[in-house]
Image: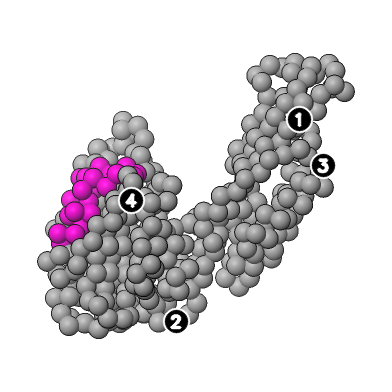
C-alpha cells in the first residue's frame, strides 16, 4: 500500500462532519512539521484551521483544502461504515474519500517527495486547511485569508484540491467560479377569507407577475469563460394550512449564479426594480457567498496542464462550471487560483469512493506541479 493511500485511510478514520476536524489537521501538521514547515493553527470560534509554511521567500505556492465532510446520512444505506475505510475492487470507500481527504493525502505526500528531492527549492510552499468548507464558510478560509492579508503574507499560486475531474483524472481543471448571490424575500399581503377576495390581498398572486419577469430576465449573455447568469427560486412558502384562507405573507429564497459580466450591486438594483414595478409591499435582504473569479492563462495554468499531460497523457480542459469553492476567498487577494482533484462522480453520495490508483496518480501530478513552479 502506498503512503498516499495509507494517509487517506488515516484521515477517513477520523469522523469530521462540518465544522468538526476530528484531529485530521493534527495528523497533517505532524507530517508537515518533519519537512520543516512552520505550523500555525488558526482556530476561529468552532472552526479549526491550519496554516503551514515552508520557506520565507516569494513566490508562495499554496495547497488549499478542507478536512470537514458532509453528513453520511443513514448508515444502513452504506455498504460499509463511512468512517471505517475499506478498499474494494481497487477503490477506497469512506465519507470524504473524494471530497476531499484523498486529495489532501496526495498533497501531503507530494510535498514530502518534492522536499526530499529539492530541499533547497525556490520560493515557499504552504498548506491552508479548514474545517468550514462544507458549512457556512465564515470562520474558515475567509478568516485565514484575512489574517494573512493583514500581515502582508501574499499567496502567488494556489491549488485547491476540490474534485474537479469528470470522466478521467485530470480531464478538467477549474480556472474560475461563478459568483453566488442569494436573496431572502418577504411579500406582505392581507389575510382573508377565500370567498371574499376583495377584502384580502394574496401575496402569491401579487408576486406571480414579478416572478415571471425575474425568470425571463436576460441578466447577461455570459462570455468566453462563463455561461449566462441564471436565476433560480430555491424556496417558496405561503399559506396557513387551511383551504379557505388567503395567506397574509409569503417568503421566498432565490439564488443567482453570476458571471464576471455582472457584479452583486447591479443584480440587486435590477431585482429591486422588477419588484418595484410590480407594486409589491416587500422586504428583501441579500447574502453574497462569493464573487466570480477567473485565472487566465499563465504560470499556474501552464504548470498544471503540463503536469497532467505528462502523467496522464492528455491536457485538462479549463472550466468555470459548478458551485463555489474556497478559491473565492483566495482569488480576490491577487493570487492565481486553480482547482484540480479527483473524479467527482460519488461526492456527497452514499458509498463515496476514490480509485486507489487515482490517489497515487494525483500525488504524482501535484509533485510535478511543484517541480515546475519551485524546482
Residue displayed at 44% across by 62% down: 329
Marks 2/4 in contact by CB < 8 Å: the verdict is no
Residue tagged by mark 4? 44
Q: Position of residue 197 (x, y in %)?
A: 84, 22
Is residue 338 rendered magenta in the image? no
Q: Which residues are magenta?
A: 8-31
Q: Is residue 336 left or right of residue 224?
A: left
Q: Secondary structure at mark 2?
A: loop
Residue displayed at 35% across by 60% down: 144
Residue 84 placement: quadrant: top left
Compute the Cα span from label 3 to label 1: 11 Å
Residue tagged by mark 1? 189
Give the mark, 1 or 4, whose residue is nearer the N terminus. 4
Marks 4/3 in contact by CB < 8 Å: the verdict is no
Compute the Cα span from label 2 to label 1: 54 Å
Residue tagged by mark 3? 279
Between disc 4 and disc 3, the foreground one is 4
Between disc 2 and disc 4, the foreground one is 4
Marks 1/4 in contact by CB < 8 Å: the verdict is no
Give the mark, 2 or 4, whose residue is nearer the N terminus. 4
Q: Secondary structure at mark 4?
A: loop
Q: Is residue 89 above or below residue 185?
A: below
Give the mark, 3 or 1, whose residue is nearer the N terminus. 1
> Which dot marks residue 298?
2
Front residue of 238 and 89 = 238
Amino acid at each position: 500500500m502506498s503512503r498516499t493511500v495509507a494517509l487517506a485511510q488515516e484521515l477517513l478514520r477520523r469522523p469530521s462532519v462540518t465544522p468538526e476536524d476530528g484531529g485530521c489537521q493534527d495528523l497533517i501538521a505532524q507530517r508537515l512539521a518533519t519537512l520543516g514547515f512552520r505550523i500555525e493553527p488558526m482556530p476561529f470560534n468552532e472552526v479549526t484551521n491550519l496554516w503551514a509554511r515552508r520557506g520565507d521567500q516569494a513566490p508562495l505556492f499554496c495547497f488549499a483544502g478542507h478536512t470537514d465532510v458532509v453528513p453520511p446520512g443513514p448508515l444502513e444505506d452504506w455498504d460499509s461504515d463511512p468512517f471505517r475505510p475499506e478498499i474494494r475492487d481497487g477503490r477506497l470507500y469512506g465519507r470524504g474519500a473524494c471530497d476531499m481527504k484523498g486529495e489532501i493525502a496526495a498533497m501531503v505526500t507530494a510535498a514530502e517527495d518534492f522536499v526530499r528531492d529539492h530541499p533547497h527549492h525556490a520560493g515557499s510552499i504552504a498548506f491552508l486547511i479548514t474545517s468550514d468548507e462544507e458549512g457556512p464558510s465564515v470562520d474558515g478560509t475567509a478568516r485565514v485569508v484575512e489574517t494573512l492579508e493583514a500581515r502582508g503574507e501574499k499567496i502567488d499560486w494556489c491549488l485547491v484540491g476540490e474534485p474537479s475531474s469528470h470522466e478521467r483524472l485530470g480531464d478538467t481543471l477549474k480556472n474560475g467560479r461563478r459568483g453566488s448571490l442569494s436573496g431572502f424575500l418577504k411579500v406582505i399581503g392581507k389575510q382573508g377569507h377565500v370567498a371574499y377576495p376583495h377584502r384580502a390581498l394574496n401575496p402569491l398572486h401579487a408576486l406571480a407577475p414579478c416572478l415571471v419577469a425575474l425568470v425571463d430576465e436576460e441578466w447577461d449573455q455570459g462570455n468566453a469563460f462563463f455561461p449566462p447568469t441564471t436565476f433560480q427560486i430555491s424556496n417558496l412558502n405561503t399559506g396557513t394550512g387551511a383551504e379557505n384562507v388567503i395567506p397574509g405573507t409569503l417568503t421566498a429564497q432565490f439564488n443567482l449564479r453570476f458571471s464576471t459580466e455582472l457584479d452583486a450591486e447591479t443584480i440587486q438594483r435590477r431585482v429591486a426594480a422588477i419588484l418595484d414595478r410590480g407594486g409589491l409591499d416587500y422586504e428583501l435582504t441579500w447574502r453574497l457567498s462569493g464573487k466570480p473569479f477567473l485565472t487566465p492563462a499563465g504560470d499556474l495554468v501552464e504548470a498544471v496542464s503540463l503536469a497532467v499531460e505528462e502523467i496522464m497523457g492528455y491536457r485538462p480542459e479549463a472550466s468555470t462550471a459548478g458551485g463555489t469553492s474556497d478559491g473565492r476567498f483566495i482569488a480576490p487577494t491577487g493570487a492565481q487560483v486553480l482547482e484540480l482533484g479527483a473524479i467527482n462522480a460519488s461526492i456527497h453520495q452514499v458509498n463515496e469512493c476514490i480509485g486507489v490508483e487515482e490517489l497515487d496518480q494525483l500525488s504524482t501530478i501535484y509533485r510535478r506541479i511543484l517541480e515546475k513552479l519551485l524546482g
